[in-house]
Image: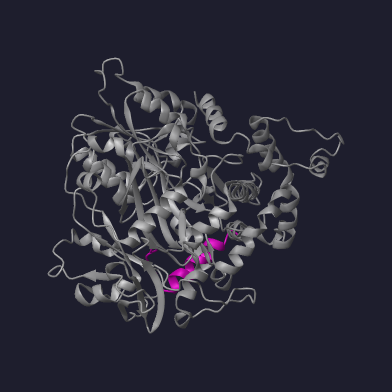
Amino acid sequence: MQSALNEKQVSQTSQGCCPNLLFINSSLFSHNNNNNNTVTKPRNSSSQCRQTFAATTSSSIFPNTKFTNHESLPSLHESYTEFNKVYPQFSETEKIDSLRAKEYYHLSFLNQSCLDYIGIGLFSYFQRQQHDASKTQLSSPSTSTPQSPLQYSDIPFFSISYKTGNLKTLLLHGGNESEFESSMRKRIMKFLNISENDYFMVFTANRTSAFKLVADSYPFQSCKKLLTVYDYESEAVEAMVGSSEKRGAKTMSAEFSWPRLRIQSTKLKKMIVSDNNKRKKNKKSGLFVFPLHSRVTGARYPYQWMRTAQENGWHVLIDACALGPKDMDSFGLSLFQPDFLICSFYKVFGENPSGFGCLFVKKSSISLLESSSCAGIVNLVPERNLPNNLSENYSTSSNNKVEVDPKKSPSILHEQELSSLISFSGRMQAPQLVKVEADPKAPEGSGTDEAKRVVVNNQINIVEDSKNGSFDIECRCLDQVDSLGLTLITNRGRYLINWLVNSLLKLKHPNDEGVPLVRIYGPKIRFDRGPALAFNVYDWKGEKVEPVLVQKLADRNNISVSYGFLHHIWFADKYSEEKGRVLQSKEGKGEKVATNKKKDRDDNLGVTVVTAALSFLANFEDVYKLWTFVARFLDADFVEKERWRYTALNQKTIEV
């Protein structure tokens, strides 16, 4: 079933793309086939295209080579030259490099490779800096960076404020939506190709809040099952499972075969269609939660699972948080029409990843929800409105977060939610003096239809025209992604992630056994893999270097990676011995466990891994830096040296 579903997915979402995604020239084939000068013409089929891509990548990147010493690695220039020979179409993506140099120049200035989160940004760094040049502490290293002010310098950076409410009531009757929120909602729905005629959108504090909102409102008393498909532990999914079980749901999870972590298709199909013949007509099985991609391993899942679930009486929630910036263009929303869809946005890549979540509810599915008091729904508060709020209900804490006085704001929900009310990763901006007054250029007697102007530190900027109902918001990152398009962005990520996978697999310890330095979990070299990677580093004895240590050492080398926990892993009998070596208890912080643990504890067992994710702005230098950093573990003394330095800094606990 897995194979058939993959072919179905390709035909629905990738038809016509393959010829543009892979062009293999004659010199490449001559390089690969030294004894055969015949040039093979690729077949005009998506399957052949994928196979050719994988074979070419494996045989052409450092062919017949293994690296046993980090000092023997080729230079950045040499590696990039060979990279372009293998992927000649990469040159077509150079406009992204130009965009990065102009709009996100802080990445080069700080020499930082951000590989620790995935998603879609709203604004560019240059856009933010132009918002108030007097607060800029970094200057552009490139003279080509535009110096002219933006048309609207009052860029709507925002905070979020929680509001009490009932999700179903909000969906049925609407709420007090500001012009800013309305414009932001419309811009996002346009970007995602989601119709306002079919779906209602709600702003949430984050991804976890969106999942929990659905769990708190879904009718688990009558639709009793919750079935999820995740190869890693997700805070958002765990919150949904916990809330659902409290409301009487029977929770189930798909399993993934070791070692490639492919979906156990037979088991998943059985869970989807079980008791199908016994159900009464029109009675729903429950909620099927399906991520289109794994944000940890980069695995892509066949879209046909959604159709199978719908045909067997399930409501469907699509987790689109791991999608690439333009992947919704090929999703086929009108074909599948999920009941719920969740995604998230951050502010500025590499500078301020705080943002919000988006919950989309199909309008025809609103009636099935139950009324409940839900936490997590938020309002977006433009930055220019913050001074008034701060003076009344907010105070700035020492850790640059905005806190709320509960005596003045009785609607605040829970103390643990305050920390995410506003979360700037950068410095806190000084409050601006803001006042609203009538535009003197507006016609007299126009009354409430007057255009308004905002005076910000004595600078006037037209931001709203109530007569025309317009409110201008420039989400420059979204605009940039729209102009680049799906094919260009997808190709770039495909070339970079597969080069990284192949290069990591070339690292071997300098001993007789040639023990691999790196183990990759999930898909390896694949045409259709996602731009995320899960791996572990092993020393020359075959012992795993704990991911949290790898993360900390990478951070000290200006490389931001993360770590995760793979779970719901199924081992065939031939891997039973390996199961005992690789499974760990998440409570044990990586401590290995015996294979005779009780079955009811299997959910607590898994594999801790290092994770890296490539945004559309990632470049070759980013993946090269990660590769050369990981190669340093080929030095048997590298970890001990770094541990000593770490202890010398009196950092006895690794903080993540």
How far across and down, in percent of the image, does residue 544 sit? 49, 50
Left or right of 249: which side holds 515? Answer: right
Give me the residue at 46% from left, 69% from top. 646
Q: Quadrant of the C terminus?
A: bottom left
Quarter of the rendering containing residue 56 = top right
Up/down of 357 relative to 98, above or below: above
142 above or below 114? below
The magenta segment:
635-656
Going 37% across and 27% down the picture, which residue do you hit? 309
Residue 454 lies left or right of residue 125; in this view the side is: left
Q: How is the image coloured?
A: one colour
Instruction: Please count the marks in the image.
Output: 0
Foreground: 637 or 261? Answer: 261
Residue 351 location (% of width, % of height):
46, 67
The picture places residue 333, in percent across and down from the top left corner, at 44, 37
Residue 62 showing in the rendered view: no
Q: Can residue 653 be found in the magenta stretch? A: yes
Question: Which residue shows up at 82% across the image and 44% down it?
Answer: 27
Q: Residue at x 54, y 55 (%)?
A: 481
Q: Give the image quarter of residue 20.
A: top right
Asked whether 40 or 307 is in front, the reply is 307
Q: Is residue 492 magenta?
A: no
**Residue 378 appears in which quarter of the rendering?**
bottom left
Residue in front for this viewpoint, 96 or 517: 96
**Residue toward you, 149 or 355:** 149
Pinpoint residue 644: horizontal percent, then vertical percent: 48, 68
Q: Is residue 443 visible?
A: yes
Q: Is residue 71 left or right of residue 287?
A: right
